[in-house]
Image: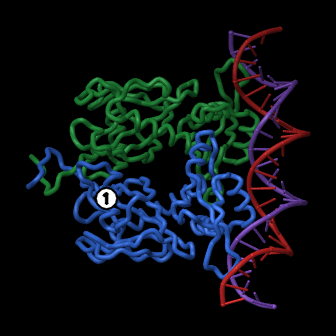
Chain colours: A green, B blue, C purple, D red
Amino acid sequence: MNYSYKYPKPSVTVDCVVFGLDDAQKLKILLIQRGISPYEGKWALPGGFIKLDESIEAAAVRELKEETGIDRVFLEQLYTFGEVNRDPRDRIITIAYYALINIGEYTIQARTDARNAEWFSAKELPDLAFDHQKILGVAKQRLKGKLRYQPIGFELLPTKFTLTQLQKLYETVLEQKLDKRNFRNKILKMKLLVDIEEMQAGVSHRPAKLYQFDKNRYKELEQAGFNFEI
Amino acid sequence: MNYSYKYPKPSVTVDCVVFGLDDAQKLKILLIQRGISPYEGKWALPGGFIKLDESIEAAAVRELKEETGIDRVFLEQLYTFGEVNRDPRDRIITIAYYALINIGEYTIQARTDARNAEWFSAKELPDLAFDHQKILGVAKQRLKGKLRYQPIGFELLPTKFTLTQLQKLYETVLEQKLDKRNFRNKILKMKLLVDIEEMQAGVSHRPAKLYQFDKNRYKELEQAGFNFEI
DNA sequence: GCAAAAGTGTTCTAGTTACACCCATGC
DNA sequence: GCATGGGTGTAACTAGAACACTTTTGC
């Protein structure tokens, strides 16, 4: 069956930049190896065509699930890329999203159009298909810009984390060293972290306290005019 | 002639939220009155379908020109809206842009699909077609958020302006009063305004000095790590 | 001379930065 | 007992906030 229109139309896809942190709090990006043409065998961002009966965000959620097995994560629209020749097949406009996930919670599984799915260090990326390098650049910039003014970093950590883990996350993404005491004073003064009275286990040094981010408290404070800032 | 595809495709449009300032430094938004169905006669954002041989931004520029006569302005992508039923005709995804213009430079002229084009106060808007109310809300929020951290306010003013005009612009968009002396000290300390040694004319009170924004200087400072902030 | 907006510094307060040592645990 | 990261407070500095009167012009 064919679909016929009075005017020519571009195709519309979604692509997802998935960020994660490894054990050493280094920034990682999830890529899939394309199993189909064009760019077969090349690494690319997970994504695919939008269906007519789903919203754009729903398409992003679905593609992420289909190609990597990831579900229920922080997902936000990034930017829409639509240069005329960004895809060799056809005129394709892509709406890019970025996702933040806690790597430990998932085992990544390649599925459908993806031959393979793997985490890459944000510093050592392979050659990417299409204009995905550019999309990734915009995503990194957005993450860096947003991290300081919105409490989104917690999405990259396990629900229970230490202050040092949190600090390293900030240092990694912002690409700058932070002072330990100042960082701790600042973040604790916000009253957004709850001390869950548990200790880190299995480390060969003094164990650290574990904290949780209090999302509800943040929403309350936000409504009262509070501005998160690191 | 018809265009036939193997899979169904959504249509893709661009819409533009055009901001301007009136003589009293109040925020205005440019709307067109639709000359064609659906929502014929209703007010809406200027916009239209993307052609296959133009980038998204080029489409936004073209539509703006076609429907309102506006050309060569600050234009930046806002967000992409793609709820399944946002358009009664068909599945239509729209990529929204926002533009900042100096009202005095243009005489607005309705053309092509627009029956009429008019400036509306941002506070007293008519009922809008489609989900344009929502798009406008996102645009206002973006403008408000961005104004403090990027020197984009100057796009709304004539090239030569007084410090009071600039301050009123900030007060209007940010919806808060600012202290005159603090505002002046802050903005002048940045060294981004050049005193062009001209005076305001035709006012029945002490005339103010005129300034110009130094874009090149801003780019230099930005590269050196300077962050604009009001 | 009066109305209307332009122009101009200082003090106080709050927030940010810089900085070094002892503590608890595993091996 | 030693290596490793955890945890803690204060002083100096800087940036932001509050605040009122004189000046210049047109009518």
Q: Is residue B1 positioned above or below B105 on the image?
A: above
Please state which of residues B89 and D8 is positioned toward the viewer in this rendering. Answer: B89
In the shown orientation, is residue A10 left or right of residue B227? left
The residue lying toward the viewer, choosing from B222 and D1, is B222
Chain assignment, label 1: B
Q: Is any atom of residue B175 visible in this view?
A: no
Identify the image quadrant of residue B162: bottom right
Q: What residue lies at 56% left-to-right and 72% top-to-bottom?
A: B25
What x and y, as percent, mark residue A208?
70, 29
Residue drawn at (62%, 39%) of the image = B224
Q: Residues within 10 Å of mark 1 (few under 14, many from 20)?
A: some
Residue A21 visible? yes
Q: What x and y, as percent, mark residue B128? A: 37, 72
Q: Position of residue B223 (x, y in %)?
A: 58, 40
In the depicted structure, whether residue B20 falls above or below residue B228: below
Q: Residue at x 41, y 47 (%)?
A: A79
Q: Is residue B170 left or right of residue A118?
A: right
Residue B102 percent location from the top left of the image: 49, 66
Which residue is rendered at x = 71% and y = 76% of the image?
B206
**Looking at this view, is A213 or B56 the one in front?**
B56
Q: Which picture quadrant has residue D5? A: top right
Pointer 1 residue: B62
